[in-house]
Amino acid sequence: MKLRYLIPSFVAALTMFVSCSDDNDPTYLDEVRLSSSFVSLPVDGGNTTITVTANGDWALQPQKWIAGKDTTVAATPKWLTVSTVSGGAGETQLTFSADATLDGRRCELLLNCGGKTQHINVLQGLPTVSNATCAEVIAGPDSKTYRVTGTVTKIANTTYGNWYLNDETGEVYIYGTLDAKGNEKNFLSLGIEVGDEVTVEGPKTTYNGTVELVNVTVVNINKSLIKVDSLSTTDPLPVEGGDVMAYVTCKGNGISVEIPEDAKDWLFINAITGNTVTFHALPNEGGDRETTVVFKTTDGKKNYTSEVSISQKGAIVAATVEEFLAAEVGNTQYRLTGVIKSVAKAEYGNIYIADYTGEAYIYGVGAKGDFEKLGLKEGDIVTIVGKRGEYKGSAQMTGGQYESHISVTDVTIAEFLTKADDKNVYYRVKGEVKDLLDNKGKENDYGNLHMTDGTNELYVYGCYPGYGATGDARKGFIKAAGIEVGDELTMIGYKDTYNGLVELCGGIYFSHKKAE
């Protein structure tokens, strides 16, 4: 079945331009009059002037203007300049100007005076639409309006109508789809589904490298003859592997299934029984993985497709920060444990954590508010599982999920000395480095030292480079970090007592400040 939606001709556009929501002629309101409610600007750039005659104060009404994802609220769009946006009683010369444009463009301004609204329609050049393939859209200039036909491969948002259109020459992201009446946020009324062949028309923009058509008008929908109704489970397949069934509705001649090359080593077709396709996944020794399977049919003249994603959980890789940062961007899950060095945005759980090998940025822990609900804070030792991501060339963990944490309490040296011995309770202590000697008065590789607050003294049984340091990784940090007597040193550790001497043990370096 084909559904056709209105694409105005230029004549229809002109008819719309001279219409008004008020029953009266907009040029002859009692409160305000225009010498013309239609402004035409040359496509090569230039200006046009009209006269506003008002019996009181007037102003152009701010509106929302969208250019790609750049949304602004102003009296006019960015491409149009008006000599003034407000005035008083009497006559005012209103000059409209715009730079040259490759394609025509238009807008409608709203002038308010005495509670009445006057419509001013501005047209520059003749809006044109180019029939194009996805490849031609991708290669073409921004702001140009294109008409393109392709298959819906994925729907990202069903309120605004954000989805992907592919015509085998390439893929374009549709950012916003208008309904049959030209309204936003009504995508579901169109009945568009993955696999449908759709013709749309809209202006091109490029956002962070992604080519988009914005707020498109639907010209035609050719419903697919094949559709994946559901999977036997919406959860990822387990690490040990297993079966998943795809239930398909097919009105064409037979079903064929294509598994992408990069998934053929772990996903197989077990059986095709009627309109049910059974897949089998092998055990997964790597990270999370996912693939998109394509189902095809034909009516003898045209091929139709539908797609479904099948995913499988992967093993979680325990890694140091250094190993995580060196890994490739992908779906592998990593487990990091380290000290929260700083909190960038508590609401979302954007934090920096560090172990003895380095520091990593965690772009969010759980859902919004989860980090705060957990009571996590700077200094705590936390374990997070997530994927290796990247933003503008900088590594980060994405999709971070909380696993566990050790709460660390800030105390003074005096307070630490009064605490009970407990290897499971951690404190953060700050003091001045009194000396870099062990209890036998000798310098050492492990960073045994004495801290003082001026009155009280605390023995630190090892200052190690960070969480997780063992063996030789604990050695030489004091020299490498340039820590000297007199510096202010912040350490994390637990309290223990040996031969009557109170010690900060399991010492995790947090920070230090050079003596002035």
Image (tube, rainbow, N blue to C red):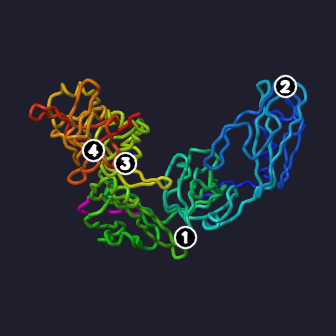
Q: For mark 2, give the secondary structure.
A: loop
Image quadrant assignment for residue 271 = bottom left
Query: How far apart, in angstroms, are the residues tagged by discs 4 and 2?
Result: 65 Å
Q: Is 152 in front, or is 473?
A: 473
Q: Which of marks 1 and 2 precedes in the sequence?
A: 2
Cα separation, mark 1 vs mark 3, equals 43 Å
Camera-side residue of 473 and 63: 473
Q: Is tag 1's residue or tag 4's residue first in the polypeptide sequence?
A: 1
- Mark 4 against mark 2, which lies toward the viewer? 4
Question: Outermost residue toward the left?
Answer: 499
The segment highlighted magenta reads 239-248
The type of residue carrying mark 1 is Glu
Whether pointer 4 and pointer 2 mark residues with C-beta atoms closer than 8 Å, the reply is no
In reply to whether residue 244 is colored magenta, the answer given is yes
Apparent side of residue 497 relative to residue 114 in the rendered image (left or right): left
Instruction: Tell me the distance, in whole angstroms, between the alpha carbons under discs 1 and 4.
Output: 43 Å
Q: Which residue matches tag 2?
A: 88
Q: Label 4 neighbourhood size at 10 Å, few (<14), some (14-19), many (20+)?
A: few
Name the residue beneath numbered marker 4.
403
Q: Is residue 510 left or right of residue 299?
A: left
